[in-house]
Amino acid sequence: MTSTPPSQDRYHGRFAPTPSGPLHAGSLVAALGSFLDARAQGGRWSVRIDDTDEARSRPEAIDAILAQLEAHGLKPDGSVIFQSRRRDHYEEALEQLAEAGRVYRCGCTRAHLRAWAAEHGQTMGAIGPVYPGFCREKPAAEDERHALRFRVGDTERRVADRRLGSIRQRLAAEVGDPVLRRADGPIAYHLANVVDDAAMGITQVVRGEDLAELTPLHVELAEALGLTAPGYFHLPLVNGPDGRKLSKTNHARPLDNREAAANLDVAAAVLGLQATSGASISERLDRWIGEWRQRHPLPAAPT
């Protein structure tokens, strides 16, 4: 397959699956969209395995994901990155946030929060229940079992998205203070994602639309750590027959590598790309790269 030589300084994208199971039709849309965006801009494309939660990560799923990407012609530049090997970096970020007064110890258990919600009701925010703030001003003691929460701001945050336009969110009211490290140890997706995107030099995050509501939080986290947030492009989702988003939780059928060309055609159609017939996988990808370049140019850099 031919494409413009990578230029990491100008553009660096990534695909970052959670290895709780193999890829399905929905995750192929995210992989293909991020790959095409990188190649269309003459950029670098990396694969990162988001395996911070060991309880959900399956070694066999990692092997399956990498084999699926290769079978579908989606070959990353450089070595695969594993979040499970980067714990020290996340702990350093937590220390930095603690020194800045942006994290606090939270001793609230799930049982306590469920009981409170049953009695008082609970505000549902953009990404789930909004934390009531019990430990915000009176943190748990150091020797008490606790999680670490991020103290969000109370102003409206606006983030530009290349497909959705402006994403607006008042974090305190619509999200609340999220957990960055659980009481039992695992680092939250939010923190690991922000730290690693910056460490890898990611300039554009292309991912599913279901993650759009996390974006203002991720931008605020990046700013709190003194990092430059990437640009964002959220892709359309693939829904199953029941209307719900395809996911591993909903037992979405794994991709069949023997049907790679057909799988790519389906994913390309979701992305609004023209159908191909009788072409090899590399020919398909080359055609779509050219089409993507015309349809989704990067916004001009500010002068």
Image (cartoon, rainbow, N blue to C red):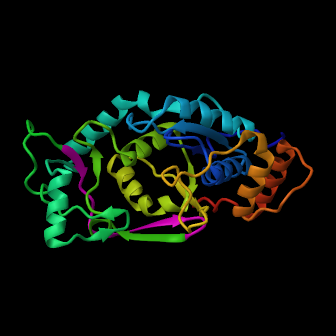
Residue at image x 52%, y 49%? 248
Residue 199 in the image: state x and y as whole percent.
Answer: 47, 37
Horizontal arrangement in the rendering, residue 65 relative to residue 2 (left or right): left
Q: Which range is magenta?
A: 147-164
Residue 142 in the image: state x and y as whole percent.
Answer: 9, 38
Q: Quadrant of the N terminus?
A: top right
Front residue (pair 114, 227): 114
Inspect this view and state whether residue 303 appears: no
Horizontal arrangement in the rendering, residue 152 relative to residue 235 (left or right): left
Q: Quadrant of the C terminus?
A: bottom right
Magenta stretch containing residue 162, yes or no? yes
Magenta stretch containing residue 158, yes or no? yes
Inspect this view and state whether residue 95 appears: yes
Residue 101 in the image: state x and y as whole percent.
Answer: 19, 49
Front residue (pair 10, 66): 66
Front residue (pair 187, 257): 257
What is the residue that sits farthest to the right in this orientation?
A: 278
Horizontal arrangement in the rendering, residue 104 relative to residue 256 (left or right): left
Residue at image x 9%, y 46%? 140
Residue at image x 83%, y 44%? 281
Residue 58 in the image: state x and y as whole percent.
Answer: 48, 33
Rendered view: 88 above or below 39: above
Horizontal arrangement in the rendering, residue 67 relative to residue 118 (left or right): right
Rendered view: 48 above or below 290: above
